[in-house]
Amino acid sequence: MVEPVYRDLKTDDGSVQRAVLCKFCDHWYIQPCTDATQAKCPNMIAKRALLNHSAQSSTRHHYIPVFYLKRWRGNDGKIWEFSRPYRHIYTKRVYPVQTGFVDRLYEMKGVPPAIAQQVEDEFMKPVDSFAARSLSMLETQNDRINYESKYRSAWSLFLMTLLMRMPEDLEVLAAAVADEWAREFPNLEERYAMKRRVDDPPTLQEFIDQRDPYHMSRWTLDLARRLMDHEGIGQLLNNMRWFVLTASNADPRLLTSDRPVLISGTLTEENAYVFLPIAPNRLFVAVNSNDTEIIVRRRVMKELIEGANKLIVQHAVKYVYGTDDGSVKFVDQHIGKSRPKSLMQRLRDRRNEDAEAKGKGHQLG
């Protein structure tokens, strides 16, 4: 989780205002940059040139990170992919880079090519890169993961992205943004009518369509990025007790999927938990209390893996992954059968409830 850095700057008129360190170009600003100003910013142009970012380099966006799936690969570098596009389970041997992606999933529409892939290049890729380092520390029990906040926060941020970066998450968020826009639109339309000039389009919607037809798409992506870097959720994850359980060779292998994180209803309760398979024989666990940690550690590993596999397959939307094809019947039996509401769906529902309560308050007033 990236914390904003502030400082006071004196402006031309002698007043002092709070400035924020730009996380992209490392310069201070008072007014946040727009997409257009970032595209023209000489600092950003130079930085992208230095990093060799091209407009076409990152159009294949992996919502299931390649570094994560590589942990299930065999000697041939491939993993087993299970899916059910129609009635029957389909199995395929694929390289991790060949699955779990949607082209241009995080692309910002209607902006200069230099910044169209900004979410992928300057958020998703760094998240996955730092998470890989943090994961190595977790597996080797490197104590730096406990006291160096950048590595701990990097892993928390990675967990949050896995809960919200999938294509269906963006669809849910886009619908929520559209609903909120619809709720606010009458007020905005009224203001537009009052301030409309003679040569302006007759309606606010026509004005927006002419000026910025992709504003909703960019609004959705910007909100998604902010939710994935949510300070409150990130801090809750940072404060949990982390450990990794390693299975023996006699235990079954862990599966993973496009919904790999198993999480309790909330993270504030004493018995809250987070589980994530991080390899065929390793399970990351986060809990809030010593008592819960003891309970988890005392579980028979075989039973723990079987329970985790069942939930991971039941929660899958499109893909399940493993090290061999021996799980075909198991996947066929459980894939997508008991999918709970995603974190994005729960956030949407809470936002709708708040809006409904606010509307009732206005009516009562």
Image (cartoon, rainbow, N blue to C red):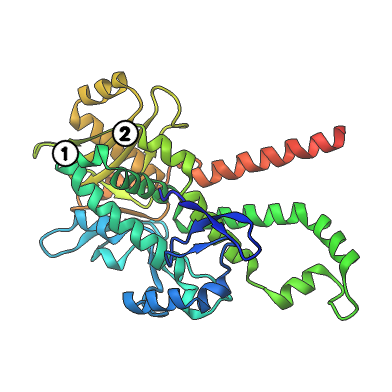
Say above or below: 240 vs 89: above
x then y, percent, for residue 139: 17, 43
Q: Quadrant of residue 32?
A: bottom right
Q: Quadrant of residue 124?
A: bottom left
Residue bearing mark 2: 286
In space, the residues marked 1 and 2 are separated at their CA atoms by 14 Å
- Local packing at callout 1 (Cα closer than 10 Å; few below 14, some 14-19, many 20+) is few
Circle 2: element type: strand
Residue furthest toward the top? Answer: 291
Say above or below: 100 vs 176: below
Q: Nearer the viewer, mark 1 or mark 2?
A: 1
Q: Are marks 1 and 2 in contact (CB under 8 Å)?
A: no
x then y, percent, for residue 349: 61, 41
- Which comes before the other along the chain, label 1 or label 2? 1
Q: Is residue 295 visible?
A: yes
The amino acid type of the residue labelled 1 equals Gln
x then y, percent, for residue 52: 33, 78
Residue sitting at x 56%, y 43%: 347
x then y, percent, for residue 355: 71, 42
Say above or below: 296 vs 333: above
Residue sitting at x 60%, y 62%: 11
Say above or below: 92 vs 327: below
Side (left or right) of 233 relative to 99: right
Side (left or right) of 79 relative to 210: left
Q: Quadrant of the C terminus?
A: top right
Residue bearing mark 1: 141
Which of the labelled discs sits on residue 186, or is there none? none
Residue sitting at x 73%, y 78%: 210
The amino acid type of the residue labelled 2 equals Ala
Q: How many labels were placed on the picture?
A: 2
